């Protein structure tokens, strides 16, 4: 059984078909990569599976359950977490508050009483320590550096304990040392049983990090396989280089 | 265990104690006001100021937390006033019961309206909120059989035969109690996880949704709670004032004043709207007195709103704080460094 799958997914904006009859299944327990030229529909696919936009046709399933057309917060509740292409944190909330926005299965009673119970606070601090931000918990998120914000965004997503994490360009705009740190973190989290889907332009990162790569071109998957297989695929070269 | 967002900034403890003392002192001063006020007019003006402080703080339950700017909250003020008045006049219910029923009814109405209204964001929401106050005004003007239309509705006083001055004193304390209740609610929401979700909506609604926050439900609850307090203020106003006219209660000016006061003081702060009300309401009354029936006070309110939006988008509270910090004893950098780092740095300094 796969964690996330899409079948015959189609989405058009006006006359432009961004995603066309796409069928993709992710490997459970793997770091899945999604690559493709600019405008090939990767981000639209992300937005479709996270419920940010509704497909014109096709189905999205998570763990075998049909979640097509669900609101984003319900999809998040089904165990899917995501980061954004241009890192998004809550600027005028503190780092700790950022962490506590996303906690699954909140009871009504807990909503009124304080920011979080002891267990949630401990977990939040645990994640902050893991990404190296524990000393910043009372700082406002907007005062963090871009790299720190990227780490905070990832940590906040992990607070909801998602089985599947979608990373939209985790290496975008960050320095090489931090890219390596994020990659190491993803490997560790994957080893702990979390499935990943990574959209990335940095080919070194994709090839080094991913177990399974799907290549998109003009709204549809054109190839899938291990990084080595995909790199050797003529259609992929054609899509990227136009040869 | 619960923590407040600022609980762990170590330098705040003495400051917070002073803040609490100031809070209590301010409350006592306010409670003494009706006895200090030299004449009936100033007692009346005092009631008006506290009423506006309660309205603006109630508005801030939705405006300050979610960033949804409602210019039409006067709709709930008018509905609360008319529902209370009509229940008292037409069914003979006791005032308190009429007020409770009116607040419950308006809250339910606001929740229903909210489900539709909070679907649109930004300026579209502002327009929807203005449409709401215009529609309720039209309905109140035209349903003459129920509201008396533009000839008004007379609401019998709370206590027959009470002098006007004594009436002002009674309602000063009733509005003060309402203000206390609204402030306590805002304070509790501010430190709750529900509040964190609302603020996340203000900062980045799509992001909050992607983290699992049921944003629509959160917004509707905040909107309805805000409307409930505004309706209570409206109901009290109707009983206090004794006569209602649709154009005065379903008024865009009342709604705009709530926004202006909150913006001026600072929407992200508990006491921001209160501070704004204490500045704007007396000023507005003064200009009404000085320039009579001219519309100058409305023009000035508008000008002030423009100035605040352009030059003080966060309100005067953060500006005051910054000034205070510059003048006060040098505070340590608040949170860039952990205790361990500070200890390490101290050791590095040669003795």
Image (cartoon, coloured by chain):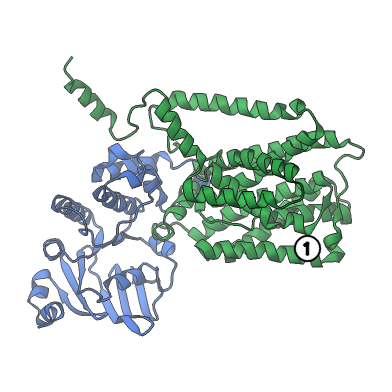
Chain colours: A blue, B green
Residue B59 visible in rendering: no
Q: Percent x, y for residue A173?
A: 21, 57
Quick one: SS at disc 1?
helix
**Residue at the image position 34 percent from the left and 39 percent from the top:** A137
Q: Is residue B248 above or below residue B8?
A: below
Q: Residue furthest right?
A: B161
**Residue at the image position 48 percent from the left and 34 percent from the top:** B320
**Residue at the image position 51 percent from the left and 43 percent from the top:** B315
Return the chain for callout 1: B
Nearer the observer, B120 or B138: B138
Q: Residue furthest top?
A: B351
Q: Percent x, y for residue B256?
A: 63, 53
Residue A235 visible in rendering: yes
Kindly indicate the quadrant of the structure image that contains residue A183.
bottom left
Q: Percent x, y for residue B339?
A: 28, 28
Q: Give the side of residue A100 with respect to residue A202, left or right.
A: right
Nearer the observer, B56 or B277: B277
Which quarter of the figure is the C terminus of chain A placed in? bottom left
**Residue at the image position 81 percent from the left and 46 percent from the top:** B241
Q: Is residue A2 above or below residue B37?
A: below
Q: Give the side of residue A33 with respect to residue B233, left or right.
A: left
Q: Give the side of residue B344 with respect to residue B184, left or right.
A: left
Which quarter of the figure is the N terminus of chain A placed in? bottom left
Q: Percent x, y for residue B150?
A: 83, 61
For label 1, the residue is: B140
């Amino acid at each position: 059984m796969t964690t996330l799958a899409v079948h015959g997914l189609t989405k058009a904006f006006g006359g432009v078909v961004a995603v066309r009859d796409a069928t993709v299944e992710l490997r459970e327990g793997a770091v899945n990569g999604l690559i493709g030229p600019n405008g090939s529909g990767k981000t639209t696919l992300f937005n479709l599976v996270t419920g940010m936009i509704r497909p014109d046709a096709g189905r999205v399933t998570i763990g075998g359950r049909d979640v097509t057309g669900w609101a984003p917060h319900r999809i998040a509740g089904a165990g899917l977490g995501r980061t954004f292409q241009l890192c998004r944190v809550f600027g005028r909330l503190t780092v700790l508050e950022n962490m506590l926005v996303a906690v699954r299965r909140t009871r009504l009673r807990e909503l009124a009483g304080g920011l979080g119970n002891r267990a949630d606070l401990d977990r939040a601090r645990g994640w902050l320590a893991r990404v190296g931000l524990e000393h910043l918990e009372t700082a406002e998120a907007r005062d963090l550096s871009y790299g720190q914000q990227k780490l905070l965004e990832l940590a906040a997503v992990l607070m909801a304990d998602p089985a599947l994490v979608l990373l939209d360009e985790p290496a975008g705009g960050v320095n090489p040392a931090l890219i390596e740190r994020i990659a190491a973190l993803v490997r560790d989290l994957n080893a702990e049983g979390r499935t990943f889907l990574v959209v990335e332009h940095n080919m070194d990162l994709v090839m080094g990090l991913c177990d399974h790569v799907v290549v998109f071109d003009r709204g549809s998957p054109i190839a899938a396989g291990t990084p080595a297989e995909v790199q050797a695929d003529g259609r992929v070269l054609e899509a990227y280089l136009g040869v | 265990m619960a923590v407040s967002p600022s609980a762990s900034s170590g330098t705040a403890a003495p400051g917070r104690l002073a803040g609490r003392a100031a809070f209590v002192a301010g409350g006592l001063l306010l409670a003494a006001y009706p006895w200090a006020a030299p004449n009936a007019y100033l007692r009346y003006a005092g009631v008006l100021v506290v009423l506006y402080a309660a309205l603006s703080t109630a508005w801030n339950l939705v405006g300050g937390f979610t960033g949804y700017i409602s210019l039409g909250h006067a709709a709930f003020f008018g509905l609360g006033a008319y529902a209370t008045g009509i229940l008292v006049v037409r069914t003979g219910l006791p005032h308190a019961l009429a007020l409770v029923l009116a607040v419950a009814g308006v809250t339910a109405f606001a929740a229903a309206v909210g489900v539709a209204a909070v679907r649109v964001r930004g300026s579209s929401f502002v327009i929807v909120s203005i449409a709401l106050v215009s529609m309720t005004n039209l309905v109140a003007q035209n349903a003459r059989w129920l509201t008396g239309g533009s000839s008004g509705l007379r609401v019998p006083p709370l206590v027959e035969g009470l002098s006007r001055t004594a009436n002002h004193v009674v309602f000063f304390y009733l509005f003060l109690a309402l203000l206390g209740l609204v402030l306590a609610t805002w304070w509790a929401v501010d430190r709750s996880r529900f509040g964190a979700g609302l603020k996340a909506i203000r900062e980045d609604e799509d992001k909050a949704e992607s983290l699992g926050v049921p944003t629509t439900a959160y917004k509707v609850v905040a909107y309805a709670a805000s409307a409930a307090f505004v309706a209570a203020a409206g109901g009290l106003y109707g009983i206090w004032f004794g006569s209602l006219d649709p154009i005065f209660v379903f008024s865009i000016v009342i709604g705009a004043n709530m926004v202006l006061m909150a913006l001026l003081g600072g929407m992200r702060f508990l006491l921001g709207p209160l501070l704004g009300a204490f500045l704007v309401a007396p000023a507005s009354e003064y200009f009404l007195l000085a320039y009579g029936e001219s519309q100058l006070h409305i023009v000035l309110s508008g000008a002030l709103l423009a100035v605040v939006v352009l030059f003080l988008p966060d309100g005067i509270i953060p500006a005051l704080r910054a000034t205070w910090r510059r003048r006060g004893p040098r505070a340590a950098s608040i949170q860039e460094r952990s205790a361990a780092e500070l200890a390490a740095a101290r050791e590095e300094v040669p003795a």
